[in-house]
Image (cartoon, grey):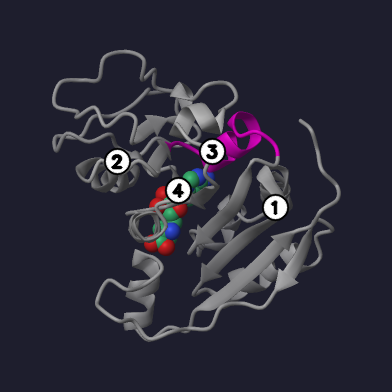
Amino acid sequence: MRASRFAKRGVWTQVTQQEQPIDFKEPLPEGVQDLRPWFIAVYDLPERIDWSTFWGNDNPVELDVGCGRGLFLHNASVQNPETNYLGLELDFKEGRRSAKRAWKRQAPNARVVGGDATTSLRKHIEPHSVDAVHVYFPDPWWRRKHRRRRIFTDEFVGLCSRVLKPGGMLHSWTDVPDYFDIIQALMDHHDDFETQPAPDERPPEHDMDYQTSFERKKRKEGFPIFRGLWKRIDGNLSES
Ligand SMILES: C[S@@+](CC[C@H](N)C(=O)[O-])C[C@H]1O[C@@H](n2cnc3c(N)ncnc32)[C@H](O)[C@@H]1O
């Protein structure tokens, strides 16, 4: 198995769960800009992240699972400078693209971790340390035989419950009706979450005034967007 591929354009290409971890503690290959700390590989995270050390402050932390090109990360971190936003993105090329935006403005409150989000949620993030989890337009994996790759599963919801503080919010939007039905079924029936009124659609004030790049694309194409919001309840707190 190959550890990684290095694209001619000078960016890390996608690393899937099946591939070997890249040791980012090694010097980066020539031509790859070191975007640390704005872009960090999951393999470079400390065993358990201490948010105060990671951000240099005790501000609230919100996660963007599958942040893609990072429109949400960018807009939210500009609009809410007192909140820290961490993107978790499997595709290193996309993740680095998001991180580069934050690097350009030396944003103190936006960063991206490259790698499978479930690894960060399961292993590296302290239980009940996060104020919100955002999951916008998760990959639908259209082909039936690929459906089991969808990120929203009982296990994923359990991981979100594990990292969210009591009262923390889980936001998820998609344009795929059957995937939204599954997300709703998983969330509405989970003991650790309470369903909240979903936000209404609002007209954009300018061309980039969308929650994410995918929302922008899908709304422009005329697709309806399904929005869900759930609150982590106070009980059932795990320590591990
Ligand atoms: C359809 S895109 C949506 C991107 C962005 N949220 C948006 O709304 O524009 C889904 C993103 O999730 C990422 N992704 C898929 N599985 C993931 C996983 N297990 N961990 C982290 N990111 C993942 C993909 O690489 C892709 O960038």
Q: Is residue 85 left or right of residue 104?
A: right
Circle 1 or circle 3, nearest the eye: 3
- Nearest to N terminus: mark 2 or mark 1: 2
- Nearest to N terminus: mark 4 or mark 3: 3
Residue that appears at 73% across and 63% down: 187
Residue under label 1, please give it. 157
- Nearest to N terminus: mark 4 or mark 2: 4
Q: Magenta residues?
A: 114-127
Label 2 to label 1: alpha-carbon separation: 26 Å
Residue 143: percent from left, percent from top: 51, 62
Residue under label 3, please give it. 58
Residue 50: percent from left, percent from top: 57, 28
Residue under label 4, please give it. 85
Q: Quadrant of residue 204?
A: bottom left
Residue under label 2, please give it. 96
Residue that appears at 42% across and 57% down: 80
